[in-house]
Structure formats: C-alpha cells, structure tokens
Image (tube, rainbow, N blue to C red):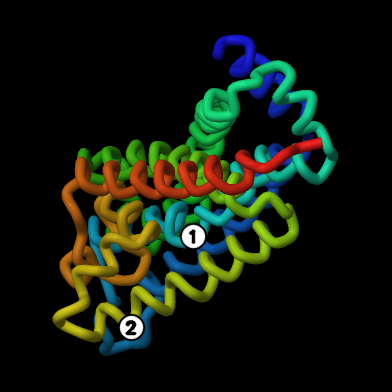
Amino acid sequence: MRAALVAEYRKLLTTRLWWLLLIVMVGYLVFIAAVVSTTFVFVPDGQEPPLAGEAAARSVYSVVNGVGYVFPLIIGSLAMTTEFRHKTITQSLLVEPDRTRFLVAKVLSVVPVGLVAGLVGVLATVAGGAPLLQIKGDGAMLGRSDVLVGLLFSVVAIALWAVIGVAVGSVLSNQVAAIVVILAFTQFVEPLARVVLSQVDALAGVAAYLPGGAADSLIGASFLGATGDVDLLPRWAAVLVLLAYVVVLGVIGRLTTLRRDIG
C-alpha cells in the first residue's frame, strides 16, 4: 500500500492540470462571491435584503461549496481517468497488482490535494465576498465562531468532493464522459432536483441526502437559501452520507471498470 500511495502522490505532483484548475477555481469563486454579496448589500430603496448579518455572510461563503465543488470533482476524476486515457493503468497495476488496494491508494492520494483546493477555495471566496460585506453590509463576520467553523468545514467538504471525484472516475473511466457527467450533474441536475424537492413538503428532506445537500449540511449553510429555509443534516450524518457516496461508487468501479482485463 505504501508503494502505491507514494506512486499515486508523485503522479499528482507532476501533473500540471490540477493546479491549473485551481487557478480557474480561484478566479471563478472570487467573481461569484462578489456577485452574491452585492445581492445582500445593494438593494432598492424601501426593500429589505434577502439576508443580513451573519446569515448573509454564511450564505456568501457557502459559494465555495454551492458552485465551487465542480472543480475538486473534476480534479479527483482526472486522477483516475487519466490512467485510462494515457494508458498508464498497466504500469500502475504493476506497482500495486491488488486492484482494491490500488483504488484505495488512488482515493487517499487526492486527500492532500483536496485539502489544498479547499483552503484555496475558501480564501478565494472570502476575498471575493468579505470586502463588500464589510464596507457596505453588516460586516464580514469573520470573527464569529459559527462562520469560522463553517469555513473550516468547507475545506473538509472540498477535500471530500475530490475523493468522490476519484470514485466517479472509477465508474466512468472515459475522461470526456466523466467530465460531461460531472458538469451536467453539478450545474443542472442536482440544483434543479434540490429546488424541485424543496417545493414538495413530503420530499423536502430528501434533498439533504443528495451530495450537494450533504455538503451544505457539513458547512452549515446553503447557497440555495437561508439556513432556516433549507433542511440540513447534522454534521456527522453529512460526513457519513458523503463517505457513503465514495464507498458505493468505489465498489461499483471496482466491480466493473477495475474488474475487466486491462492491457
């Protein structure tokens, strides 16, 4: 296992694409956080802002998960699908012939990169949203413990998204197909499903068990609305839900993609 972990980690460090994605992620999150913060600090005369105070700050900072999770998902999926695209899977399995241990090593190797992406994403979100909240709003609220805890768990959530990305790549070994599915799911399918489910009382709680809903529960805020308007799971339950996605997708990948003859 150690040899496999070292090999996988070295692959990530020698690949430029993941840090290029981080650069794009930074610019995207700074822009989106700034745009979202304007909706709370610039309102027509006589109207109340959608959210104010700490609730507004937490909503702005939740952008890192609400729209930024596509980047760690892609980074994680590339860690797996690149093996098949560039035909390096054979050499990788020579280093670690046990395919289960190979998959576990692949999953664990992206955790440090995911944590870096989480830290970078949080800093970018704060940089984009905090100035307007501080200057024109009720304050950036960066001294509030609940806000800081939410930012800390945002780093963890982004790291978990990278791990889920590896599991997705183990199921969809075609790199183009994996990226298309990730983009479609994160930008259209899940946001639409969560909005639709939230409109049906009997199904509103189901949205919290979708990947994005679980991640929102982990950070304690939702980009889709005020915390009180969105059903959130306890943090421990959110972690279990996200890990369950990793396990289920990983098992599917192990029994399908990694079970086939690879030459």
Binning the other alpha carbons within 10 Å of mark 2 as few (below 14), some (14 to 19) or many (20 upward) gives few
Q: Position of residue 117 (x, y in %)?
A: 55, 38
Say which label, 2 or 1, has the lower sequence index: 1
Where on the picture, by quarter, is residue 40? bottom left
Q: Please name which of the two marks, 2 or 1, marks the residue nearer to the observer.
A: 2
**Secondary structure beneath label 1:** helix
Residue topped by disc 1: 33
244, 132: nearer the viewer: 244
Split into 4 quadrants, where in the image is the N terminus? top right
Instruction: Name the residue carrying label 2.
Output: 196
- Marker disc for residue 169: none
- Of all residues, the one furthest to the top in this rendering is 2
On the image, the x and y values in percent for residue 41 come to 37, 70
Disc 1 residue type (three-letter): Ala
| Spatial CA span between label 2 and label 1 | 24 Å
Residue 183 point in image, percent of width and height: 61, 65
